[in-house]
Amino acid sequence: MKMDQRSVNSLITELTDYQMANKNPYVSFAAKYRNTTVLVYTSGKIVFQGKEALSLAQTFGYREDKRSQTKASQAKGANQNQQNLALIGSDEVGNGSYFGGLAVVASLVKPTDHSLLKDLGVADSKVLTDQKIQTIAPILEEKIPHKALLLSPSKYNEVVGPGKVHNAVSVKVALHNQAIYLLLQEVPKPDKIVIDAFTNQDNYNKYLKNERNQFHNPLTFEKKAEGKYLAVAVSSIIARNLFLENLKKLGEDLGYTLPSGAGTRSDKVASQILAAYGMQGLEHCAKLHFANTKKAQKLLNN
């Protein structure tokens, strides 16, 4: 896509904190934001690459052509029938961020909730500003039945890693399963349960065998489910808010502003925490198996 210079400048300003190095001589600016790489070329061309490329591009003014819109409308129509069911949807936030915990939320949304959710502007948390999320999440927490789990960085480091109980996938299986299990104890049986697919169903079931709490409701795994199902979108928003609150609290504990994501800014802040508190400081606020840990150590030693 191409933008006018004013829009390009706005994009660069918004993503400055997420800037990353890029050796391509034709790239004037590069950033990594919420699992999406953004490249600004000297020609004026903008490239968005990653899971949330389209939604992020749309926030900066991109509009699909009519053919793409027609396909999207057809898909939306096919999915609308699914929305007219009582759905449990679960999603996680924090798995791509070096700092902060891992939040997983399961929510039950009924057709009678749709009017409220529409009025609130509920959508995938990745396309909402943090300010918007912090405004509507408390309302959702009050109005929508849900279960929210937060695995703190210190606990995460205790159970995730080589030779430990979990890897980065199995820990999410455990949290999604537990959140849904706990919600099912308190609500009527839903018509469908949807999980935003972070792995395939066979892999999920393999790790699920290790879980003590089990339920027999069938699961549906869909990629980008947070953009298709209101129940998953609600969970995405509540989880994002929980993650942000935890990120702020951890930063206050150490006297630093902790960035989300896993870019060069995270490396720099991590090296500062290492200098001030040693590895114990990082264990308190970061997921140590990320590559950022070694990068921070390298920065500290240079």
Image (cartoon, grey):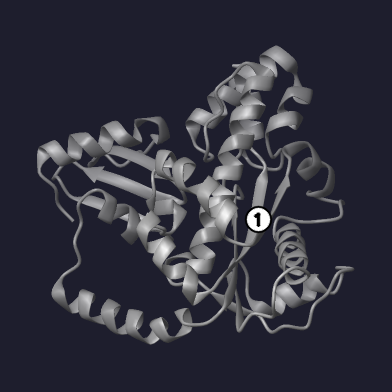
Looking at the rendering, which quadrant does residue 228 occupy? bottom left
Looking at the rendering, which quadrant does residue 250 occupy? top right
Residue at image position (27%, 35%) is 12
Residue at image position (32%, 61%) is 54
- Residue closest to the far top: 276
Most foreground residue, 111 or 199: 111
Q: Position of residue 77 (x, y in %)?
A: 33, 84
Q: Note whether residue 133 is visible.
A: yes
- Residue 253 against residue 286 in the figure, above or below: above
Residue at image position (67%, 42%) is 101
Most foreground residue, 89 or 263: 89
Q: Note whether residue 99 is visible.
A: no
Q: Position of residue 28 (x, y in %)?
A: 24, 36
- Crowd tier of the residue under label 1, counting other residues whose Cα lies within 10 Å: few below 14, some 14–19, many 20 or above: many
Q: Position of residue 17 (x, y in %)?
A: 40, 30
Image quadrant in which the N terminus is located: bottom left
Image quadrant in which the C terminus is located: top right
